């Protein structure tokens, strides 16, 4: 039973967790809305979206498995101690589910809206294929001994790797085009807020538990926050400092499209994307 002194800390990390959930969840909508208003996905890197779907699907498998499976929770307690907290909360499962669904919506927009000559690179297709093939092999390795905690740790590692590389194609594409038009900065600002809140939640949880197992017991959650914050800062610098093309953005999102600007942006999107 929690002591009176621990109640404020419990309340704090619950609030931080749900703030991160809402920030990350809402962060998907600016891009969806921007695509809808423009009826175009020019400027949004398709490799980023594909890698993002792989990342969120892997994260959903990890979160849902550890949150709902009593067998996996038992294996976790046996490894880290029965007094430790399961490092996955309801908001983690809710976020992952929502993220997969919204990423699928963006993929649908890519299929139906103007995309110029942009396409998914063979490198990204190869990465995704190798990832899921490796996951299948790991499943059959874990099956005889029921090493489910190890198996979901593989999915956690996948989502960390995908988080690390998924931003690179979009950052490089922005650099080649010298523009962030078509890529929503609202997504990045909300993602940054969620990443900082997520990291703060883990710190408060560790203080409350008087243990840092919450960090090394869920390394993926720590790395995802740090990597996301790092790339968010890069995108913010690109948008506001390096390529503040407000005129082009206004023309691209207004009802009266400036066709000349639009054609330039479509042509610039044809730069090599095999990152």
Image (cartoon, rainbow, N blue to C red):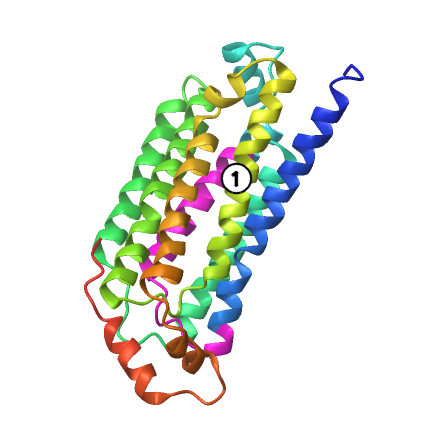
**Residue sitting at 21 percent across and 56 percent down?**
122
Instruction: State the image coordinates of residue 13 (x, y, percent, origin top left).
Output: 65, 31
Instruction: State the image coordinates of residue 60 (x, y, percent, origin top left).
Output: 51, 41
**Residue sitting at 52 percent across and 39 percent down?**
196
Classify residue 20 as left or right of residue 265: right
Give above or below for 237 relative to 8. Answer: below
Give above or below for 93 relative to 4. Answer: below
Residue at the limit of the structure toward the right, as seen here: 4
Span of residues in magenta = 36-63
Front residue of 35 and 133: 35
Q: Name the secondary structure under disc 1.
A: helix
Image quarter for residue 50? bottom left
Evaluate whether residue 159 shows in this view: yes
Classify residue 90 as left or right of residue 127: right
Instruction: State the image coordinates of residue 100 (x, y, percent, origin top left).
Output: 50, 51
Residue labelled with disc 1: 196
Instruction: State the image coordinates of residue 84 (x, y, percent, origin top left).
Output: 60, 15
Give above or below for 78 relative to 109. Answer: above
Image quarter for residue 258? bottom left
The question of residue 49 being in magenta is answered with yes
Quarter the N terminus occupies: top right
The question of residue 19 being in magenta is answered with no
């Amino acid at each position: 039973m929690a002591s009176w002194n621990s109640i404020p800390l419990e309340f704090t990390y619950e609030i931080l967790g749900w703030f991160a959930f809402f920030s990350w969840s809402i962060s998907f909508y600016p891009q969806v809305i921007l695509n809808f208003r423009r009826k175009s996905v020019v400027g949004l890197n398709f490799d980023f979206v594909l890698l993002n779907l792989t990342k969120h699907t892997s994260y959903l498998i990890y979160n849902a498995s550890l949150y709902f499976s009593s067998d996996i929770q038992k294996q976790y307690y046996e490894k880290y101690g029965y007094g430790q907290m399961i490092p996955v909360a309801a908001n983690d499962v809710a976020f992952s589910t929502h993220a997969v669904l919204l990423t699928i919506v963006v993929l649908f927009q890519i299929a139906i809206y103007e995309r110029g000559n942009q396409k998914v690179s063979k490198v990204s297709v190869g990465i995704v294929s190798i990832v899921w093939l490796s996951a299948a092999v790991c499943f059959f390795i874990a099956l005889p001994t029921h090493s489910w905690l190890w198996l979901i740790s593989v999915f956690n590692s996948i989502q960390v790797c995908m988080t690390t590389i998924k931003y690179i194609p979009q950052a490089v594409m922005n650099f080649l085009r010298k523009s962030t038009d078509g890529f929503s900065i609202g997504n990045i600002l909300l993602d940054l807020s969620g990443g900082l809140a997520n990291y703060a939640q883990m710190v408060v949880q560790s203080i409350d538990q008087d243990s840092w197992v919450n960090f090394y017991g869920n390394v993926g959650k720590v790395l995802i926050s740090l990597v996301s914050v790092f790339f968010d800062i890069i995108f913010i610098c690109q948008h506001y400092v390096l390529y503040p093309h407000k005129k082009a953005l206004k023309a691209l999102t207004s009802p009266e499209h400036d066709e000349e600007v639009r054609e330039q942006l479509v042509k610039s999107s044809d730069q090599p994307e095999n990152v």
